[in-house]
Amino acid sequence: MGLGRTLIALGILLIIVGVFFILGERLPIRPGRLPGDIVIRGKHSVFYFPLVTCLLLSGILTLIMWFLGRR
């Protein structure tokens, strides 16, 4: 029964992430383009490091894993 619940939770999570990416262009703050993300534009190249996006995703995933592991 534990594996079934985990698969259902992962499925719901994937649906939420999918909807977030579909609607992401319409949001006032785009995913991956948060304030604090590092963008260095050169003459012929662009370096992009989503620092704040990585920290935010890490925090969200940590909370989700903490809630799932509390049982």
Image (cartoon, rainbow, N blue to C red):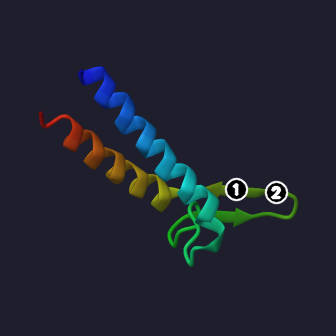
Q: Is residue 13 left or right of residue 40?
A: left
Q: Residue at x 76, y 58 (%)?
A: 46
Residue 19, quarter of picture: bottom right
The amino acid marked with disc number 1 is: Phe
Q: Is residue 22 left or right of residue 35?
A: right
> In the drawing, what numbered circle is on residue 63?
none
Tell me residue 68's x, y (percent): 23, 38
Tell me residue 48's x, y (percent): 65, 57
Callout 1: SS: strand
Quadrant of the drawing holding the N terminus: top left
* Residue at mark 2: 45
Front residue of 50 and 23: 23
Callout 2: SS: loop
* Residue at mark 1: 47
Are dots 1 and 2 in contact, CB under 8 Å? Answer: yes
Front residue of 25 and 5: 5
Quadrant of the drawing holding the C terminus: top left
Residue 62, quarter of picture: top left
Front residue of 31 and 24: 24
Against 30, residue 21 (above or below) is above
Tell me residue 31's x, y (percent): 56, 62
